[in-house]
Each structure stands twice: as C-alpha cells, then as structure tokens.
Image (spheres, grey):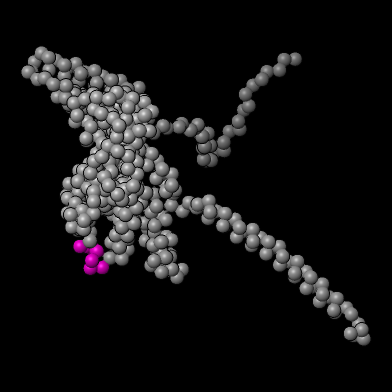
C-alpha cells in the first residue's frame, strides 16, 4: 500500500464569515542617511567634469591665471555640476539637501586643510632647531647671531610665557566669571553699562591694552617693565573674552534648577555657587580656554610692557622677561637662517603649549553637568555605610527591649 503526502486541506469558511487575515510580511529595515553608490558616482563625476571645464577655461579660452583663482573657479563649477547631475536623479528637495551637505563637508575639509598646512609649514621650518635638545634647555644669553643651531634655545621664552599666562589667567578668570554672574544673575541698573563696557573691550586692539598698562602701571606708578606688567596687559585682553563666553553659558542653565534650589531654602549665593556654576562647568572651561588662547599669542602688549632680554629670568616681578611671541617676533625678522629656524621652532613650541593647556583644562573641568567627583562619591559611600550600620543596629535594640518587657511580664508578683 502506497502512502501519498498531500498538503493539508483547509476547511471551507462558512458563508458570510470575514476573510482570514493575511500572514504578516517580514519587516524590511530601512537605512536612513549614509552614502550610496549613486552619491559617490555623482560626486566623482562632478569633480572630474568641473576640473576639466576649469582647465579648459583657464588654459584655452579665458586669459586667467593664478592658483587661487583656479581653485575658487573649480569649486564653483563643481557646485553647479553637482546640482545639475543631482537634478537628473533626485527631486528638488533632495538635491538641495545634498548640495547643502556637500557645502558643509567641503567647508570643514577646507578648514582642516588650512590648519594642517599651517602646522606642516611651521613644523617643516622649525624642525631643524627643535630636534636639538639644547633648544629646550638653554637660553640665548651666550649665543650670537652666527652661532650654530646647536647653541642657544628658548627656555627663557617658554618659562616667561607660562608665568605670564598663568598670572593673567589668575587675574582674568575670577574677574570675568564674577562679571558674568553679576550680569546674568544679579542684574540691576548697572548690568547694562557693564555689558556695554565688556562688549567694547572685546573689540579693543591689543596695542591699546599694552599702551594702557604702559601709561598707568609703568609710567604713572613707576613700575619697571617685567613679566607682571605683561600679565596685566594680557588680563585686559582675556577678561572680556571670558566674561562674554561665561555669561552666555550661565544663561543657558535651566531656570527650573534655580527655582528648585530656592524652593529648598537656598539663598542666591548658595544657588549660584552650588547649582549654576557646577552645571555650567564645561562651558566655563571653554570660556577660560578661549581667553587663554587669546592671551598666549599676543605680541604687542608684551612688547610694550615686558621688555626683551636674551637672558633667563624666572622672576616675573623683577626686570625684563621675554615670552614666546616676543621671541618669535624678534628673531624671525633677522637675516640669519639659524635665527629664523629658532623662531619657527619657538612657534612650534607655542602651538604645543596651547595644545597642552587645552587638554589639561578639558581634563580638569570637562566633567558633564551633575557628574560627581571622586571625593563626593567617597563621601556619599561613607554616608550610605553609616546609614546601613545604623539600620542594622535598630532591630537589635528593638529585639532586646521586647525580650526585657516579656521577662518583666512573666515574673510572679511576689518576686518583685
């Protein structure tokens, strides 16, 4: 007897019954964004076509010349070609969206390319002097203009820049943050004049700051040119930058946090100190870094207030003290290749100092809002352990008290 495997026969649906639902179709994952093959081909075709057309215009048709004009014309032709090729494939809305993306990406790449070009040029010109250890361990007090590159260095300029920038940061940051807190939290009639003054100081030329300290501190009060006077001039340049950036960051703190602090009985000072400033810490660090970046590369205020010396001076309050910008300005204009190489090596050192300061500031103050420090975490853990120990001791005391009460209840009255 042979058995056939036939498909199961479904019973016919009764008359008038609704049709059976269809089985669900498998879900298809839709990928949003990304780069497709059409995008790559369109981009490559636009670049190649615009380059060929630009070369034909510059070399065969129009009397144009110059590398800068060639690149600008190539970019404009590329945008036109990309728009035309995209219009053949996509709708108007998608073409505009892709065109804006291309402009944004190309602008970012241009900025990165310019920065890389500057760093590469300085590195190429200054590596000849920076690769010798004496450049970071010696000063220029025993080095002449025609001395070999293995003699002399920028130790005095590095120490002077760090001391002057440190003093300027010590003066500018508390004043700038205090002014920002006054304008954003306190207010009143004086808030607008202070804000106007800060905005005017933001656009103040650096030479004016140097002349101000030269006329007030050096000529009027009789102080000598020194690193301290240079730090005062840098403070004038850094303080408005810190104030403007800190005010914007403090204003971004949600008002509900202030209201919650006031509802818990906190005063305005405690609210600012314990709620507003910790919440705005990452932005305040950015404000400080912006101010330091403004002050570390200033030359004209330092030129008028610190003086120039080729000797090492580690005391910013006495005698002349040179800094890295002043060191670069003084040696790059000399007609000696060794001096020019030392100037470019100092510029490379200045970029390294800025990078180290930026990374240090981000590490020290770059915690997210609400993120606790290690000391705060240890304090919370100690409090939790004490509470747990107290919670364990309370039931033991309760059991002992209950046992004593039962014992006293069961003792006969005559035995008292």
Question: Is the N terminus in the top left, top right, bottom left or bottom right quadrant?
Answer: top right
Identify which residue is drawn at 67% across, 64% down: 390
Note whether 54 is above or below 300 in the view shown: above
Identify which residue is drawn at 63% across, 27% down: 8
Residue 334 in sight: yes
Is 383 colored magenta in this rendering? no
Q: Quadrant of residue 94?
A: top left
Q: Quadrant of residue 80?
A: top left
Q: Nearer the viewer, residue 239 or 307?
A: 307
Query: Is residue 348 rendered to the left or right of residue 82?
Result: right
Residue 200 in sight: no
Residue with the most extreme top position: 60
Query: Is residue 54 rendered to the left or right of residue 291?
Result: left
**Which stretch appears magenta?**
188-193
Query: Is residue 38 rendered to the left or right of residue 394?
Result: left
Q: Quadrant of residue 62?
A: top left
Residue with the most extreme front position: 142
- Residue 61 position, x and y percent, is 8, 15
Is 190 colored magenta in this rendering? yes
Q: Nearer the viewer, residue 384 or 302?
A: 302
Residue with the most extreme bottom position: 414
Identify which residue is drawn at 16% across, 19% down: 54
Note whether 101 is above or below 206 in the view shown: above
- Residue 86 position, x and y percent, is 25, 26
- Residue 199 position, x and y percent, is 21, 54
């Amino acid at each position: 007897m042979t058995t056939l495997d036939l498909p199961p026969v479904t019973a016919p649906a009764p008359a008038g019954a609704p049709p059976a639902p269809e089985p669900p179709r498998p879900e298809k994952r839709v990928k949003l964004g990304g780069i497709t093959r059409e995008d790559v081909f369109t981009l490559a075709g636009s670049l190649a076509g615009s380059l060929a057309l630009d070369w034909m215009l510059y070399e065969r048709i129009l009397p144009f010349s110059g590398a800068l004009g060639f690149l600008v014309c190539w970019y404009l032709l590329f945008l036109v070609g990309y728009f035309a090729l995209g219009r053949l494939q996509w709708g108007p809305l998608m073409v505009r969206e892709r065109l804006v993306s291309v402009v944004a990406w190309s602008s970012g790449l241009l900025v990165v390319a310019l920065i890389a070009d500057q760093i590469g040029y300085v590195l190429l010109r200054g590596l000849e002097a920076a690769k010798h250890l004496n450049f970071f361990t010696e000063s220029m007090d025993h080095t002449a203009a025609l001395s070999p590159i293995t003699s002399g260095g920028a130790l005095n300029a590095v120490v002077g820049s760090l001391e002057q920038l440190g003093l300027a940061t010590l003066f500018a940051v508390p004043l700038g943050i205090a002014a920002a807190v006054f304008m954003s939290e306190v207010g009143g009639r004086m808030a607008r004049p202070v804000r106007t003054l800060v905005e005017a100081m933001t656009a103040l030329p650096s030479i004016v700051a140097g002349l101000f300290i030269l006329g007030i501190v050096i000529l009027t009060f009789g102080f000598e040119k020194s690193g301290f006077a240079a730090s005062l001039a840098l403070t004038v340049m850094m303080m408005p930058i810190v104030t403007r950036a800190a005010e914007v960051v403090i204003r971004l703190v949600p008002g509900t946090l202030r209201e919650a602090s006031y509802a818990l009985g906190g005063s305005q000072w405690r609210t600012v100190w314990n709620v507003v400033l910790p919440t705005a810490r990452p932005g305040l660090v950015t404000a400080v870094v912006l101010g330091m970046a403004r002050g570390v590369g200033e030359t004209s205020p330092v030129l008028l207030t610190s003086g120039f010396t080729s000797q090492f001076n580690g005391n910013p309050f006495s005698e002349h003290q040179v800094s890295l910008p002043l060191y670069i300005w003084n040696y790059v204009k000399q007609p000696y290749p060794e001096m020019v190489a030392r100037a470019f090596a100092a510029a490379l050192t200045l970029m390294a100092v800025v990078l180290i300061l930026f990374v240090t500031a981000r590490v020290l103050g770059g915690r997210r809002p609400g993120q606790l420090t290690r000391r705060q975490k240890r304090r919370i853990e100690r409090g939790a352990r004490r509470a747990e120990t107290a919670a364990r001791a309370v039931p033991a005391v309760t059991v002992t008290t209950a046992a004593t009460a039962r014992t006293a209840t069961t003792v006969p009255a005559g035995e008292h």
